Image: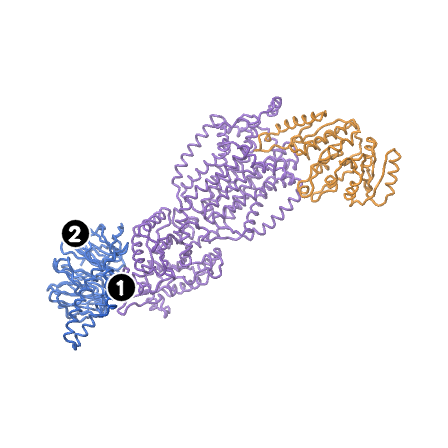
Chain colours: A purple, B orange, C blue
Amino acid sequence: MNKLSQLIMAPIKGSEEFAERFLFHRRLLVLVVFALATLFLAWQAVQIRPDASFVKMIPTSHPYVVNYLKNRDDLSGLGNSVRVAVAVKEGDIFTAEYQQALQQITDELFFIPGVDRAALKSIWTPNVRWTEVTEEGFVGGPVIPPEYDGSPESLDQVRTNVLRSGQVGLLVANDFRSAIVQVPLFDKHPDTGEKLNYQALSEQLESLIRDKYESDNLSIHITGFAKIIGDLIAGAVQVVIFFGIAILITLVLLYLYSRSVSGALVPLACSIVAVIWQLGLLKTLGYGLDPYSMLVPFLVFAIAVSHGVQIVNTIALESARGADSWLAARRAFRALYIPGLTALLSDGIGFVTLMVIEIRVIQDLAIAASLGVAVIILTNLFLLPVIMSLVGIGKTATKRAALAEQKQHSGWQLLTWFARPRGAFTAVGVALVLLGLGLFQSQQLQIGDLDTGAPELRPDSRYNQDNRFITENYSTSSDIFVVMVGTENEQCSSFETLSLVDRFQHYLTDIKGVQSSVSLVDVSRRVTSGLNEGNLKWRTVSRNQLVINASLSYVPAGLMNPSCSLLPVIIFLDDHKASTLTGVTQAVGQFADQYGSEQIRFEMAAGNSGFEAATNQVISTAQYQMLAWVYGVVSLLCLLTFRSFKTLICIIAPLALTSVLCQALMASMGIGVKVATLPVIALGVGIGVDYGIYIYSKLSTYLVQGMPLRDAYLNTLKTTGKSVAFTGMTLAIGVVLWVMSPIKFQADMGILLTFMFLWNMLGALILLPALACVLGCEKSTVTLPKKDSRKQETENAL
Amino acid sequence: MPFDKQILVVIDPKDSDELALHRGQLIAKRLGCAINLLWLGRDDEPVIRLVKQLQAEGLSASYQCCMKKALLETLQALWQTQHFGLLIKTCDPRTHNFTTSADAHLLRELPCPVLLVKHDSSWQSGVVVGAADPLSESVEQRSLNRGVMGLAKEVALLTNAELRVAVATPSAMMAANPALQSEAMIQARAKEAMQQQLADLSIEVGDIDVGEGPPEYWVPQVANQLNASVVVIGTRARGGIKGALIGNTAERILHRLNADVLVLRTGVSDQILPVIKS
Amino acid sequence: MGSIQLKLRWLLSATLLLQLFLPVAANDRLTTPAVKTVRASQALLLDITAAGQQLIAVGDQGVVLRSSDEGLSWQQIQTPFSVMLTSTFFTDEQRGWVVGHDGLMAFTNDAGLSWQTGLDGNQINRLRLERLQELLLEAESLSDADPDNEALLERLDLLSWQVDDAQVAQEEGPSVPLLDILFTSPERGYLLGGYGLLLRTDDGGQSWQYWGDRLENPDSFHLNAMTVDHRGFLYIAGEAGLLFRSIDDGVSWETLDSPYEGSFFAVTEFDHQLFLMGLRGHLYRSEDGLDWIAVETGSGATLNGAYSSQDKVLLLGAGGTVLQSSDGLRFKRLDSGGRSSLSAAVIIDHKTVLVGEQGVVMLEANDE
């Protein structure tokens, strides 16, 4: 292993000399190049736009989604739609004022870009009709009659038509106090190919509809995936403000810690440059920011700061020993080169492995995070020392560092208990107990959403209030699971197909969580009954194909495709909780196994709940895959760097404990593992490994000289440990403020990240040395010539 | 390629101190070799006078004129015909951040040793400091070390000066090989290695000054502390892109030293000694 | 006949014969057992009846429900079919019948705990075709005997057409729905269905004869409901105002003048009066079955079914309509608790149990 390690590490070590000489001999050139690059990338970065897309959120190679994408063109309005409910506070909807407002709103929505006009539905659109059976047969017409004039008689007619249209509970509330406009959207316009601009759409919905029409008597409620994204994007401003506050806090604390203006400003500036580069590169490569990866820039900032602080701290120590700013910076660069590079490479490669998860949003996040970390190498490992070599750290900081090295900190002294056998075993024991508790609690970790509505937003947010309103007053939920029944061409309306789907829909009524279902079969049944004077005894699928064909002479859009080879069964669910979705997919799978065939295929799934079911399935395997990859990469790099399995355990074990406890925390907080929260734990590993590598590197420089663990540990604490503790605390303080964010997603992440920052810090400071003691990492691997060892002792004693 | 027993002195008419000239005179007298003056100007009247002066002192002297900006080309052209064993020039104090200085170009392009003069005091009974890197594993560096130490020893003998060695060790790197993690250990190793190499060359020194580098810091530190008269240092003479990016240590220490700098180019160390040994 | 024509006829018959023995496709609802669901009592139910103290409700997807506690709780009985069941009738506590789409008729001998298929659409098609072919041969010989008789020729035409129609129906498969069943005695029973279908049994359901030719129904309108009055007269009501009466126990049928041109869905007797109802809430009352008087109920919703007991008659209809009367003259609207259509009702121990679009609905105890 040593040979292999040397083979792989040689380029890293070789590169150090080159990098060091170049950076410190050509400082001005370096600064100019970096400045130019920063300007260019900043210009790119400010052009970055939110880039949300429905398809990016779903696992595109999962069989459900593959089936959906295959049939996408034939399934209008089932992918992405928004529902706008217009409600009266007093009275009912059958008033002239209300109907006028509803008509105007329908028209406004018609003209919003991105709306699938042909599939727009409200009682004012011509595709919503009433039917009735009379002695002469079927009669019908649009719900709003052509001669409507707002008079009381007209309104009465409308009321009758609404009752006869079967839209009560669908487009008209059960209590007749509100009506819905169903607005299907094009994720990608079929003619122009342009992508849906979620931000613009949401803004238009707010300004053109809500602001314009909400009044004393009218309230507007809007739900749908597009609105969630729009609200998240609108909330991005808030998110940025919280980032800003965190950055300010970091700056202030940095100054207080180092007592050096340059020591505070320069790392902060370099970290911000890293974020600018990251965003600029993303834009250059053609990516945008989606609301779920809006945390990545802050993470990049956090990781950059923790590396920056290490370097500044080392510079201060070198300055305390008398070096001038150029020398101090150069020595610090060399000293921290390997641990810094290893940590960042393992972060970067670790994040790249998230690409194995076949969900675009997560893959984009993987790229963004890896890019960010790679950029940190340039800004904080290279640029930062160069700038510090020019500005120096300041006299105050130097004096402080000199004093600190001489003092015996009683505070740190306490912690050294953990480096002695008794303390070490206690610490490891406690860690094992916590591990057990964490594993136990994390059994309760759920995949998918645990609540109704949009969990990314607060329960009292406008969106969730609107969602509750619609769920309470209408019979169709917004949780839609579509089973695509595929047949050969022209067979979707055959008796065999329809009667089997009829059976399927009956079977579905028994599944927990299924509210109701709609398909071509319902049309056939009702019209067959209608063709026979509305006789209930005829409300079934006729065996006579001619009767079937007659019953399907008018089919509303979306219930079959033009070549009659696809028959969607639209299932309305009570909610989209993971347990509900699992139950539904299992039940449908059982039915498909038992009754499906080559001629009549029951394929899942479309509809937002269908995608969520697919996503949940992918995530449940993905979360372990992802952790395996990240830990694998990180472990490999640590192993190659330190060439010892014991060291590996010392560094990785505290990380693993943090991961398990974080999962337990998510379970206790009721946060489900979803696309948004999945990468959090992997990102936490990336943050934590930095601490472990720095601490262990420093520890081993003392151990290698023959120091006993306790002393080595104390010295480590006084130097690197201090930086780690500072960084952990500062970032935790910065992030804990996020719990006040109106975006619940950010608030949840705030809590999880605070926990991870703190726990990683504690793990690196306490558990790592404890493990080192327990595993016996004390033996140094280099023997010194005898006469010099005496010199060593006198040196150490000083 | 063999070196002629001849030294070439570059004289800049604007240089009032005439450091290079004086140093050249002293060395030529000591070694008994011919001295050639390269006058950076058109008017050759002053240089003709100088030549007459040198001849008067018993030295074989000659001169050339050239334009300042054509210095490097002239030297290279000269080299084709005369293989002068030493080039002496006053050290140009300017430091450059973006471009390579004229002195650096000389150090890179010319195959002969170059002496850059910074002060006027005699080297007699002073301190000669040789700068070497005993920890390097590169064959080139090892031979350069040998050449530098050999040359330093000869100079010390000639000038009756104390010979010292400055060894700059690399700073400790965390998480590197254990041997590289402790500064104390590195220095101990370096000292041991240097002693071994000196013993191989049968050179005795006053003391080996081992200190934490980089060389740009430590060598001037030692030289200034000891008040050295001359520092002998080797150069890898990197040119082109490598030279532009990372440069050469010898070029980098020029502005930090008070002593004269005698730079030995890589690859010629074996040939130069016979010239100096007289 | 030429040899080619002979061969063609042979081929045709062979194909027809073959179709008789073609197995029904896999998953065919005639032969696939009904799906058992927990929420079966909320499925579309079309008829309900009492079998002793048990209640039996039947409906869509082959659902047969049985309750022993007067409708409070229901168990779904396993059935070997899953077609929509439209009507049920019990001749006594143990023996009962159910009919439905695709010509299905099934029976039970153990008070509804288990059911067996008695007839299906294929058999019915065959019975119909055979009977019509018999009649055609008779008519052919009669016409041959009297070639100039216009009436006979017309009848021959009609019968030829009906035979062709029956053959086409047979090729199409078992597609005729049965809409009602009535037994006037343990042995004598009738099945009514779409497109003028009528069958009669004299041996308690073991064998059936096609009886539709006895009704004057040239347009093959649906026959929706049948009842027997206190005099033993039989009445059949159907689509487009069809109304038939038989006073000789079903042997011959006369077409009555209908008070309405729209469909009748139910006919029943209460307090020695006949009630006829159907599309758009039309309701008619008659003493003798010949003169009908319209009854004003104030409701325009289609009436689907009726139940008469000793002291009251209940009419069930669309939009949650429940009309009750104790004298047959004035009808009061009861609150069924919703807007879903109702199809049938039964009163057991003063409890009224309704069935319809949303399954079983218990009616609140009302005051007269």
A410 or C126: nearer the viewer: C126
Q: Do we see residue C347 in this rendering?
A: no
Please say if A612 is above or below A109. above
Looking at the rendered structure, which numbered label has been put on residue A115? Answer: none
A543 or C77: nearer the viewer: A543
Q: Which residue is mark 1?
A: A534
Q: Position of residue C298 (x, y in %)?
A: 23, 66
Q: Do we see residue C357 in this rendering?
A: yes
Please say if A371 is above or below B58. below
Looking at the rendered structure, which numbered label has been put on residue C111? Answer: 2
Label 1: few (<14), some (14–19) or many (≥20) C-alpha neighbours in 10 Å: many
Outermost residue, bottom side: C148
Whether labels 1 and 2 share one chain? no
Residue A405 image-quadrant placement:
top right
| Chain letter for the residue marked with disc 1 in the picture | A
Measure the C-alpha gap from mark 1 to mark 2. Answer: 32 Å
Q: Nearer the viewer, mark 1 or mark 2?
A: 2
| Chain letter for the residue marked with disc 2 in the picture | C
